[in-house]
Amino acid sequence: MPAALSPSRTDPAPVLAELRLLLGDRLSTAAAVRAQHGKDLTYHAGHAPDAVAFPRSTEEVAAIVRACARSGVPIVPYGTGTSLEGHIAALEGGITVDLSGMDRILEANAEDMDARVEAGVTRKALNAHLRDRGLFFPIDPGADASIGGMAATRASGTNAVRYGTMRENVLGLTVVTPTGTVIRTGTRARKSAAGYDLTRLYVGSEGTLGIITEVQVRLHGVPEAISAAVAPFETLEGAVDTVIATIQSGVPVSRIELLDALQMRAVNAYSKLAYPERPTLFFEFNGTPAGVEEQARLVEEIAAGFGAGAFHWATRPEDRSRLWQARHDVLWATKMLRPGAEMKSTDVCVPISRLAEAVLAARADAEAAGFAAPIVGHVGDGNFHMSFLIDVNDPAEMAAAEAVNDKVVMRALDLGGTCTGEHGVGSGKMRHLEAEHGAGIEIMRAIKRALDPGNIMNPGKIFRLDPAAAFPER
Amino acid sequence: MPAALSPSRTDPAPVLAELRLLLGDRLSTAAAVRAQHGKDLTYHAGHAPDAVAFPRSTEEVAAIVRACARSGVPIVPYGTGTSLEGHIAALEGGITVDLSGMDRILEANAEDMDARVEAGVTRKALNAHLRDRGLFFPIDPGADASIGGMAATRASGTNAVRYGTMRENVLGLTVVTPTGTVIRTGTRARKSAAGYDLTRLYVGSEGTLGIITEVQVRLHGVPEAISAAVAPFETLEGAVDTVIATIQSGVPVSRIELLDALQMRAVNAYSKLAYPERPTLFFEFNGTPAGVEEQARLVEEIAAGFGAGAFHWATRPEDRSRLWQARHDVLWATKMLRPGAEMKSTDVCVPISRLAEAVLAARADAEAAGFAAPIVGHVGDGNFHMSFLIDVNDPAEMAAAEAVNDKVVMRALDLGGTCTGEHGVGSGKMRHLEAEHGAGIEIMRAIKRALDPGNIMNPGKIFRLDPAAAFPER
């Protein structure tokens, strides 16, 4: 579906002329380029920017921001466009800043296990670079996202249960502020008590407080031994209870992923596999050879008590790659369940003790509303997704899916959880964020107003600046 | 030394009358109470507040803040008074809010390994409460600090190399904002992408953005096996190189602490011990019995290559307690090196590969300036302290110590490190913070102005609000 043309807040013509001088043909106003940059992979309506800029340095980004700031032209930062909550929609027009051309790995230090990369470096590119050095960057949201984008959305993914999220794995940032000033947050030190934690403020700020142009990340040693397994269960309850017992036992699993029966059917069809179409856990164990064997044995024992079938093991790297590629292709597999429909995903995260309750109730909600909505999750963290395939032109269907999402979110909040474990807020979860944070939203608003008084940075995202304004439609 | 009376910014009389109605005898204007609350354990001059309030609930704290906000009276939050950079000095008078009466453990959940405590609960009180449940709270800054204070200063300590700092171990907070609004940040979920990371903004904000009244913390399982060891080295280089090689080898040590020869002499004298008075590492290993044995063997091998003497092992809990108590008493032991003098401690943290350079140069700097300054450090993180014992009435000595500190800090920044690994900025490291953060300070100022427009929360700390103002003297 082509992206809608949005009413621009400001006449962009003078800024476009200025940026054309700066960037030459690295400024595009081609309709296809604009449309592609304003539409994500989900049900969110596309909103094309007036132009797309392709800078190659922090200084160019700063020059773009200064030009836009002078004219009040909105800016939308763009990494790989793989976010899921309308983050990249240019709701008020303006300039999308595509950072994919900033793809240099500036430093990688084996002895300190850290690296500094430009924002457009993707996680796979960084890991390819690190392959021969016994190190890897663990954060893995499925898509081959840019590290700048992953920082901006506080991404996590399958490895977070062991290695943490972008919150724990970013040491520092280079940020172009909304006035076009370049700042550097953090250092290469592992810890610091030096003032406000600006790194953590920008991580997860979704482009609303500035543009991240460089990221200093922690790296981790490639484990001596890695083993992966797929285990089918009689029931969804059995699979979830296995997760809870595993986490509570303290076994340091590096990945523990849940796919329900419908999700397994989609995966088999898309990835041409023949796994049992039953609730299934995907595991990965890291460590010494003896440690991995011990972890695996403990988890098999736990799972047996909850109705697990035979574990299917993958220890050769190519077998593990195939297994995790199938897991990572879940988004595409899900989309094939209803060709032509758009996807909308829930993303709650709850305390592990409440995971079974949250997952089972979510499935019941979806079934009661008549949706065949597969469930997949990074369940070791208490985080899961239920995916709706919807006809975005059917308002009743859209409303019904949103009503289920509301129920799932409000239940998660009641259980002590969060409305979004990893996808972020964008324009899709603003109501839920306000429900979660209450008066805290006013603190976020005050920070936004202080740092971006002209509201040029990714406007219309995360929260309503004006609490009396309407929530965005899509 | 009695605390100086500071000129108060505002006549506190009307607020005192209002607070007396609210708190009765839980508001003190006794000179001794005020002096004690305005003076920390270090060289910083004391600055007594006009009164000290002892609230018992978040609501009382909010009422105190609202009263002060109406009159523009400064507020200094106070936990146990064990911070080291003048954080608690009431530089402009006002009300110190002592949170020690808020000492309830509100929740402790074994199945999710988290707890919610009031800000005045100390780390030892929480761990005593958890003792029978197989859980512990690892952050350990030496002093039996309050968990609220530890959050406010982003504390870490001996266990951070394995378990992280307060940054990683706080899930959420209850905060009274500078307008007296109560907000709750974070949730019980392990991860979240829900908006700006307010939790991490308040962690380390040193009371300048609000008062933390409750803390939701992560807990960890007590390891099956724990073993500790003390190892003397021929040289300081050998000890530091052992640390570097241990961290780079990936051995998951839970503690690895350095004490130089002078520090060991101080420890022996204060704690009545007879360790060799040589550069020494204190280790702790956690895990399964087999895992602990493997870690210990690997580290002994590494250490042997760098001139270690015999390891002295402590596996019985009482022996380990004695060993770590000696380590935790370093501050008191150091003070005994020169009775009557006050202490001033450096606190840089550098990338581990640069640790030897940073430590050896720091010692050379101190020696060149004629100081016998013992060194102790959480060296697994790259963090170490050099302690000066100074006559605060001797301006030349004060200036000489500060000059050495400057050198140590500027070198750490050159090496990619930070001016403070864990002590925070207070009024003592404001110049260094500005050197470290450059233009980022303006972002911190903007946040402070937005959230505390009257500058009532712990004024004069972390950074100069007005960049043209003078830095505080002490």
Image: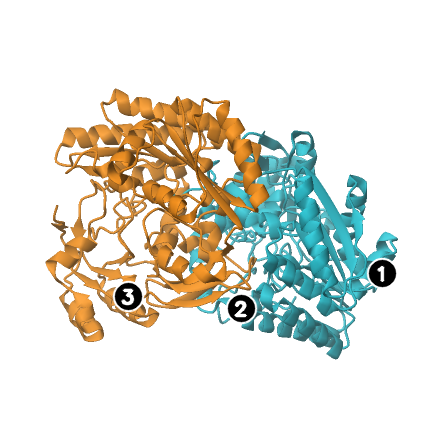
Chain colours: A orange, B cyan
Q: Residue at x 54, y 53 (%)?
A: B204
Residue type beneath disc 3: Gly
Asked if both marks, 2 and 3, belong to the same chain, the answer given is no
Residue type beneath disc 1: Pro
Residue type beneath disc 2: Gly
Would residue B280 appear left or right of A229 to someone viewing this image? right
Front tag of 2 and 1 = 1
Q: Residue at x 27, y 29 (%)?
A: A373
Query: Which chain letter matches label 3?
Result: A
| Front position in the image: A382 or B434 | A382
Would residue B379 appear left or right of B373 to someone viewing this image? left
Query: Which chain letter matches label 1?
Result: B
Looking at the image, residue A430 lies above or below residue B159 = above
Q: Residue at x 12, y 45 (%)?
A: A1
Asked if both marks, 2 and 1, belong to the same chain, the answer given is yes
Front tag of 2 and 3 = 3
Q: Which residue is mark 3?
A: A101
Tag 1 near tag 3, CB within 8 Å: no
Q: Which residue is mark 2?
A: B416
Image coords of residue B244 (percent x, y): 63, 63
Asked if both marks, 1 and 3, belong to the same chain, the answer given is no
Q: Which mark is residue B326?
A: none
Tag 2 near tag 1, CB within 8 Å: no
Q: Residue at x 55, y 37 (%)?
A: A295
Q: Residues within 10 Å of mark 1 (few under 14, many from 20)?
A: some
Query: Which chain letter matches label 2?
Result: B
Q: Which residue is mark 1?
A: B276
